[in-house]
């Protein structure tokens, strides 16, 4: 486990999380969440939890984004708060 | 997100490479789940991702005609039934609920698994049930979220 790489991944993890919370366009928010899931999957694989990393990569970075966009197509695209 | 994409390259790549390889990788994760990372849930999620990719790219009508929502519902129900049977059947052989080392599947060892222990035979049956259930449920989720486009 290389701690520099892990620190870099954790630093990268903060950016899409903040973007997903702050951005007004909800599809951009879903894209940021997908990037977040991908970085989390890389982190989990580095920590040795390959089972969880597989699940996170397939569900978090794959299907959840599609389901979120499918749900967004039933409502409005921009957030109002 | 339900109309077929009109790029020929995208169709070719998805139909000839991505969907078959993702499904083969999912089956690999399922079969080797007892000895290496992976298992029924992960394999089901990976294969369901391939199905959703096919539905996104090739258009809803084409993909749904190949693998209808009705079949997905039956798949999920069959997975649940397999899991439940793997739990209930050991009760009739004098063991506890879900004690799959007592499942009467001695013949299964000759065709499927490299592991000689009794638990490895039963865990594959449970994993297969979980695989079918997760695959069917994730497909149903996508199909019902985009269902209103069917009427257009």
Image (tube, coloured by chain):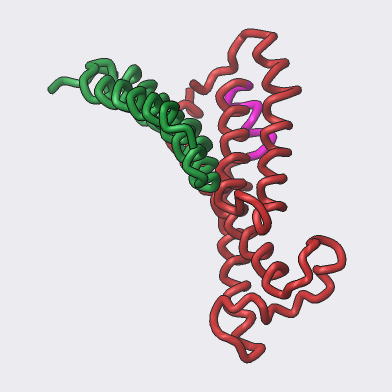
The x, y position of residue B53, in whole percent, is: 58, 28
- Pick the residue in front: B91 or A49: A49
Residue A73 seen from this side: no
Residue B41 on the magenta segment: no
Is B75 situated above or below B69? Answer: below
Residue at 51% across, 39% down: A45
- Pick the residue in front: B150 or A42: A42
| Quarter of the image where one finds residue B107 | bottom right
Q: Count of labels shown?
A: 0
Residue B113 seen from this side: yes
- Pick the residue in front: A45 or B69: A45
Is A45 situated above or below B82? Answer: above
Is B98 situated above or below B120? Answer: below
Residue at 13% across, 23% down: A81
Q: Residue furthest left?
A: A81
Q: Horizontally, is B102 left or right of B116 in the view?
A: left
The x, y position of residue B10, in whole percent, is: 65, 13
- Pick the residue in front: B134 or B71: B134
Q: Magenta residues: mostly which secondary structure?
A: helix
The x, y position of residue A66, in whole percent, is: 45, 29
Residue B64 on the magenta segment: yes
Q: Horizontally, is A55 left or right of A11 in the view?
A: right
Q: Bounds of the magenta span?
A: B58-67
Instruction: Identify the hue of chain A.
Output: green
The chain painted red is B
Residue at 66% across, 58% down: B34
| Quarter of the image where one finds residue B115 | bottom right
The x, y position of residue B46, in whole percent, is: 59, 39
Q: Residue furthest right?
A: B110
Residue at 66% across, 46% down: B29
């Amino acid at each position: 486990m290389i701690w520099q790489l892990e620190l870099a991944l954790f630093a990268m993890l903060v950016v899409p999380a903040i973007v997903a919370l702050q951005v007004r366009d909800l599809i951009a928010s879903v894209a940021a969440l997908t990037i977040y899931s991908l970085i989390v999957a890389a982190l989990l694989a580095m920590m040795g939890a390959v089972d969880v990393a597989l699940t996170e990569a397939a569900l978090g970075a794959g299907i959840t984004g599609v389901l979120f966009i499918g749900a967004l197509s039933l409502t409005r695209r921009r957030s109002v708060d | 997100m339900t109309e077929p994409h009109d790029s020929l390259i995208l169709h070719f790549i998805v139909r000839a490479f991505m969907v078959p390889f993702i499904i083969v990788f999912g089956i690999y994760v399922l079969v080797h789940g007892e000895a290496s990372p992976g298992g029924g849930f992960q394999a089901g999620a990976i294969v369901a991702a391939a199905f959703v990719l096919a539905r996104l790219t090739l258009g809803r009508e084409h993909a749904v005609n190949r693998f209808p929502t009705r079949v997905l519902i039956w798949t999920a129900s069959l997975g649940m039934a397999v899991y439940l049977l793997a739990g209930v059947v050991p009760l009739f052989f004098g063991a506890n609920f879900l004690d799959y080392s007592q499942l009467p599947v001695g013949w299964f060892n000759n065709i499927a698994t490299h592991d000689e222990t009794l638990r490895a035979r039963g865990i594959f049956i449970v994993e297969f049930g979980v695989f079918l259930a997760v695959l069917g449920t994730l497909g149903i989720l996508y199909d019902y979220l985009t269902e209103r486009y069917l009427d257009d």
